[in-house]
Structures are given as structure tokens and as C-alpha cells.
Image (cartoon, rainbow, N blue to C red):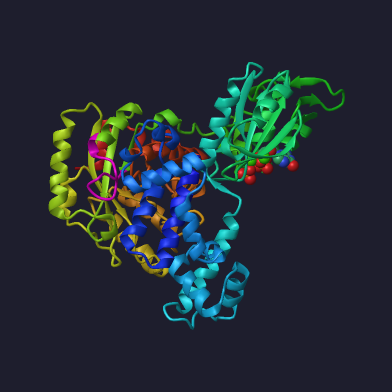
Amino acid sequence: MRNQEIAEVFYQIADLLEIKGELPFKVRAYRRAAQRIETLEKDIEEIYRQGKLKSIPGIGESMARKIEELIETGKLQYLENLKREIPEELIRLMDIPGLGPKKALVLYKKLGITTIDQLREACKQGRLRMLEGFGEITERNIMRGIEMMEESKGRALINVAYDDGYRIVEYLRQNKDVLKIEIAGSLRRMKETIGDIDILVSSLNPDSIMDMFVKYPYVKEVLVKGSKKTSVILKDGMQVDVRVVRPESFGAALQYFTGSKDHNIQIRNLAIKKGLKINEYGVFKKDTDEYIAGRTEEEVYRVIGLQYIEPELRENRGEIELAQQGKLPKIVKYEDVKGDFHIHSTWSDGTSSIEDIARKGEEMGLKFVGIADHSPSLKVAHGLSEEKVMEKIKEIRKLQEKFEIRIFAGTECDIKPDGTLDYSNKVLKELDFAYAAIHSKFKMSRKEMTERIIKAMENEYINMLAHPTVRLIGKRDPIDVDLEKIFEAARETGTFLEINAFPDRLDLNDVHAKAAKEMGAKMVIGTDSHAIDHMRFLKFGVAMARRGWLEKEDILNTYDLSKIEKMLGR
Ligand code: DGT
Ligand code: CA
Ligand code: CA
């Protein structure tokens, strides 16, 4: 069983326990464990086989035994029993953002609602607002939750698709008949969510590739199997299309199947104007059908008169015009980003020690890590008091002596509803850097919210604004805020806007990052890691930056340490 599947089971247990009215700490324990398992870097089966399940923070004896049962039998009796106590339909209702177990139970008991359609109807008729503890706003939120769930249906977060996709690439690569293999589609473009995974193989023996692909152990169902294209559904529900082409077509097919569709339409039109024809087999002269290119993507772009366009730029947002003039931006490279500013440690709600974070950073080849724990008003996340912050700084200074990698002592300081900060300047000044962040009162008016955030940005010790729109993909809409004003304030105050790399945030996203750059703002990338296993998400932040046309100079993380220190202004 994969990490994701086991995590799902634990999330379900948490929801069901909550409905049953179990103690909150027990519910929370399952939810935390699920989060940890979901984002573990290692395969949980491997950890199990090494007898090390209990070394995962938050996993004790009883959870370890449940994981064992799941791995060994594919089922869990405990969950089956819980499900027998609670109606099946309720379990699905609970997944709606803004609803949750407690409210789902009320809807079931008071209105007899068991399906999403019934729920939508009841919202429209305004029947929810009559219930105790609901009201009009809740009703509207639930309505929006239903929409959000339907919008995100069938699309996966990028980290899930990324891990699935690259595992299959590694698996197929063992086949001697594979000449070349690449991820294509939205995953190659590193879009924020992924519909299905596209993989392209160059080979002279397609059947050998496809035979091996359908035998991949994680395949649940084969949709179609042919020698050109084979599609399967994985056990986590993800669809994967593998296509095999001949070597002389590989570049053309990679270009074609990378997309985006809008980008390709423009490319095709351009080719026609040049008297050429382009398809997944190659580029041909229109009148004679003579093959002129197709082995590599570079030659495909070259023969139609374009600079090579990086996959992350292929969204038809003006990249083709610039490529014609040879004026594409030199977008930041993955290896240009030398560190991560947004890491939570055991001091607040992280599960890794600062020492482990530093060691992991060194393993990843980073030049610095920034420890950004929460401030006191975020009680659920064990925000640090001012005294604790001073202790934490001391620990970091002491640890620094043991490490080559630079450890920056920072914070993710809450912005209170009135725009004041959770820490005094006296404390902020002692830190190496400070993020400001919104974690409460998401529903203020646009004007108030904008003023609230700008006020925080104006503080001389605030260097960065964390996850500026506060959205959670598929779960929470962005706050209502005037981003143009925020970008302007960022430029004026020298505040770096975060591209939060955590897969369900990706905030700022590509479109926002591009607009922010155009307005003269600079950006910073942070993973929002709550465990060292999350630090690998850094690449998704860089991906958003690349999709937002950002260059090296636009991103604080790419500067050398002395320049970073200067920018942090302590
Ligand atoms: P997704 O899977 O929804 O996240 O997005 P994509 O971009 O991976 O879309 P997908 O899997 O339907 O197709 C992969 C690529 O193949 C797509 O980006 C462009 C290319 N493609 C698919 N259908 C067409 C088409 O009808 N015309 C053109 N020009 N290209 C297509
Ligand atoms: Ca796709
Ligand atoms: Ca596809």
C-alpha cells in the first residue's frame, strides 16, 4: 500500500471518530498522523519492513499496528467497524470543504440529508440557515464548498502526480527497449494541478514497453492497450497515458504532447505561415510532405523560427511572440534556488528539530535554511512566546557552530485583524528575518484586508509576506484583497512576496507572480515545511516562479549569503 492510501484511511478514521464525538485530541492525533504519512519522503512499506514505523513522529504502538494490518491484509478491521456505526453517505458529505463531520451529522439528523444533490437543494432553499450553529454565511460557504469540490474533481495536487509519474519513468527505464523517456503534458509544464499524467517513450519495440507498463504493480485498471497509446488508472485513481513513438518523431511528439493546447495551436499556425506542417510525427514541408525535423524539441522550435521555449512557459501567454524575437526571459533554473526560508521546527508545530532540518538542507545541497515558526496568537500551532523566541535564537546560534549550512532564525509572525503584529519590534529585530502572515479572520472586506496587510508590510522588520492570498487548492478560496495594491506596497517597502511551495498552497501562483514582477516586486520561495520530508517541495515553488516568468534576480533565495543578509537589513 502506498503512503497516500494509508493516509486516506487515517483521515477517514479521524472524521468518523469526530462524528462519533470522540475526544478532540484523539481525532487530532489521527489527522496529524495522516498528514505525516501523506508527505513522507520514504515508502511507508519500506519503513515498516525495517521495523521503524514508530520512528515516524506521531505514530505510536496502536497506529503502527493498524499500518501493519493495512500493509499485510489491505484492510483494517477497526475502520470497517467504524463504518458500520455511521451511514455511508455521511462519509462523502464530510469531504465538502466548509462542512466537516460535525455539521454533516446535524444535516443528516435534522434534515435527513444524505447526498450532495440534496444538500445543494437545501442550500438553495435556504433551509440550512435555520439550523442552530449554521446561519447564512455557513450556508453560502457550504454552497461554495460544493462548487469547489466539483471544480477540483479529477485533478490531483502536483506532488502526488509528480511522485506517481517519476516512479513510472524509473520503472520503465529499466526496459532495454526504451531509447528515451520523458514526462509530457501538464506535469512537464508543472501546472499547479494535474488532470492526468502523460509519458512519452522513444522505442523501436513499442509492445515491449506497453507489456511492461500494464504490469506495473500499482496499476488498478487498464483502460486501453495499444502499441501507440496505453492508458491505465493507478490505485490512487490517477490516469496515466503512455505513448510510444519512433526516435525520429520523439522531439515532435514531446512538443505536441507537452502542450498546452493553446500554445500548440499558435505553433501550428506559425508553421503553416512558413509553409510547414507540424504534428506529433515531425515537421514537414507542406507541399511535398518532406520530413525536415522531429528528433528533438530544440530542432522543432528552430525550424519554425523560434527560440527554444521551456515547458513551464508554454501557456500561450506571450511566450511565442517573444521567442520569435529571440527575447524570452532567462527564467530561473531549479538549481539557482539555494535555500528555503519557510520551515517550521519542533519549536512550534513542526515535527523535525532544527538540527535535523539543517542536516537535511546540507544533504539537499542547500546553502541556507530559514526557521520560521509561528507566533503566539496561533495557539493551535503552538506559536512561540517572545521569551521562547529568544531561547530559539540562542539554540540556533549554538547549532550554527556545528554546521556549514547557514541557519537563519526567523518567524512567521501573525498579522492581527487590525494590521498590528504578534511580536514587538524588540523581538523582530533580534531575528534574522521575519515573515508576516494571515492565519485568522479571512473574511474581512477587500479594503480592510488590503489595509491590514499593507500595514504589516510597512513594519521595518517584516521582510516577507507569507502565502499572500491564503488559498488552499480545492479547500479554501483566496482572501478578498487588492493584489495590485499589495504588489505596489511590496515594491515600495522592499517586502518580498512569498511563492509558497507547499503543494496545496502554491501561493503566489504563476499568474500572480508574473503580475507582481511586472509591477516591480521581488519574490521569495518557502516550502512551509512542517517536517524534513516536506523540504523536497522546494522545486514546486521554483516551478511556479518559472511559470511566472521570473528570473534569478527576482528571487531572494538565489542571492549569495552576504547579499541576502544585506536585504534582510538587520
Ligand atoms: P491535464 O492532463 O488536464 O492536466 O492537462 P494536459 O495539458 O496534460 O492535457 P492532456 O493530458 O489532455 O493532453 C496532453 C497534451 O497533448 C496537451 O497539453 C496538448 C496535447 N493535446 C491533446 N489534445 C490535443 C488537441 O486536440 N490538439 C492539440 N494541438 N494538442 C492536443
Ligand atoms: Ca495530462
Ligand atoms: Ca493525457
Q: Nearer the viewer, residue 460 or 74?
A: 74
Quarter of the image for residue 164 reads top right
Residue 348 appears in the figure: yes
Q: Magenta stretch: residue 352 in it?
A: yes
Residue 477 appears in the figure: no
- Relative image position of residue 83 (x, y in whole percent): 50, 60
Residue 522 located left or right of residue 77 = left
Q: Residue at horizontal 47%, vertical 40%?
A: 71
Outermost residue to the bottom: 130
Q: Magenta stretch: residue 196 in it?
A: no
- Relative image position of residue 406 (x, y in whole percent): 24, 32
Quarter of the image for residue 209 reads top right
- Relative image position of residue 545 (x, y in whole percent): 46, 40
Q: Which residues are magenta?
A: 343-355
Residue 39 located left or right of residue 117 = left
- Relative image position of residue 228 (x, y in whole percent): 75, 29
Q: Which image quadrant shows ligand 1?
A: top right
Q: How many marks?
A: 0
Q: Nearer the viewer, residue 457 or 536?
A: 536
Quadrant location of the C terminus in the rendered image: top left
**Magenta span: chief secondary structure:** loop
Q: Nearer the viewer, residue 522 or 537?
A: 537
- In this view, 448 is above or below 52: below
Q: Residue at horizontal 49%, vertical 31%?
A: 330
- In this view, 508 is above or below 565: below
Q: Residue at horizontal 25%, vertical 50%?
A: 348
Outermost residue to the top: 176
